[in-house]
Image (cartoon, rainbow, N blue to C red):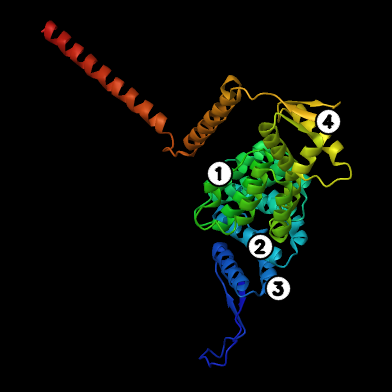
Amino acid sequence: MFTCNLLQEDDTEMDVDAAAPITQISIKHGLPEIEIYCYLLVLIFLIDQKKYDEAKACATASIARLKNLNRRTVDVLASRLYFYYSYVYELTNSLAEIRGNLLALHRMATLHHDELGQETLLNLLLRNYLHYNLYDQAEKLRSKAPRFEAHSNQQFCRYLFYLGKIRTIQLEYTDAKESLLQAARKAPTTARGFRIQCNKWAIIVRLLLGEIPERTVFMQKGMKKALTPYFELTNAVRVGDLELFRAVADKFASTFSADRTRNLIVRLRHNVIRTGLRNISISYSRISLADIAKKLRLDSENPVADAESIVAKAIRDGAIDATIDHANGWMVSKETGDVYSTNEPQIAFNSRIAFCLNMHNEAVKAMRFPPNSHKEKESAEKRRERLQQEEELAKHMAEEDDDDF
């Protein structure tokens, strides 16, 4: 039984049956799918009208009704209700209130083998944890959640995006880059906001890896304005100018805070210094540590000592090929050799080949085949062989009969 309150908000008169009250009409229907669908329509309407308190009440009532149902025909509608249930609480900044309910719903969907509900609720729980920066709890949930084949491309894209964010915070930049780029590629072209967020995080991760994103990344249709702060940040990292990097970080501080990438940008300071040091080592065969500190614009109490430690760490990590003359306070750069005599071309080609192979494997996995097509083909071949054998046997028997005659 589904009860719907119909309130007359305007002054126009309506012709109604006197036996039925205007304020409340009871609708009886035997199918719970109709009831859940009505809940969904009312919830979307209340969210569009920005009546969030009423929407929260409607969402809570719909979830309570869903807990009493165990019908596979309701799974698709239920997944949509889960999304709007979390969305209305996010709009009112009260996501923490429903975390327990989401965990209970995810457990129920797992017991009912509702895979679409499982992936929807898993993404909602990951979003809930990441909203409050609970990255460790999000990773524990993700690692222990049951694994299954993705049913919805949109939910799979969201999962990849959240996985990329978790990997970025955990300093696993290579895995984070792969997840974020894959989410951006698989996302529908109409989901521009989602693709913008994926590209923002992917740009930061690539900068942390020491890569410089191509200019075409920032010039994508509909994304140029949103990616402008990250374009200027990339330019500062590419040049290796610490002062320019600070200016860009301060200029777009509000944007980076809204995107929740400010903490990651703080990590980029070391990359900026290393890039500037690499440019210096290429330009000068010998340069004093004091001049390095001036060119890098180090603003510490003892810039020469800081420059010496930075150069020593860069040499140890293999970022530059140089030596330090501690007696004279110099950095002596070695002659740059032929890059093709090193393993760098092999590493670059290997990464490209691995990317192409992974894309090929994903395309093969995404292909759809008729069920039991290989078995039908085998049975048809066996049937053909059997008929051929029967024909040969019949001919042989006919020939024997002719001989006897």
| Nearest to the observer: residue 142 or residue 212 | 212
Q: Secondary structure at mark 1?
A: loop
Residue bearing mark 2 = 87
Q: Residue at x 66, y 71 (%)?
A: 55
Residue 129 position within the rendered picture, expressed as x and y whole percent measured from the top left: 74, 52
Q: As shown in the figure, which amino acid type bears the numbered disc 4?
A: Gly
Residue at x-position 53% and y-position 50%: 187
How far apart marks 3 and 1 lie (CA) works out to 46 Å
- Discs 1, 4 touching: Cβ within 8 Å: no
Q: How crowded is the residue under tag 3: few (<14 C-alpha within 10 Å), some, or many (20+)?
A: some
- The image position of residue 347, as x and y in percent, is 59, 26
Indicate which disc, 1 or 4, sits on the residue closer to the N terminus: 1
Q: Secondary structure at mark 4?
A: loop
In the foreground, 220 or 45: 220
User: Dot 1 corresponds to which residue?
Assistant: 214
Q: In terms of image quadrants, where is residue 20? A: bottom right
The picture quadrant where one finds residue 341 is: top right
Quarter of the figure that contains the N terminus: bottom right
**Disc 4 residue crowd, few under 14, some 14–19, many 20+, Cα 10 Å:** some
Q: CA distance from mark 3 to mark 4?
A: 68 Å
Looking at the image, tell me whether mark 3 or mark 4 is earlier in sequence order: 3
Tell me which amino acid carries mark 1: Glu
Q: Secondary structure at mark 3?
A: helix
The quarter of the picture where residue 293 lies is top right
Among numbered discs 2 and 1, the one appearing first in the sequence: 2
Residue designated by label 3: 53
Q: Categorize mark 2 by other alpha carbons within 10 Å: few (<14), some (14-19), many (20+).
A: some
User: Which callout, 2 or 3, points at the residue further toward the start of the chain?
Assistant: 3
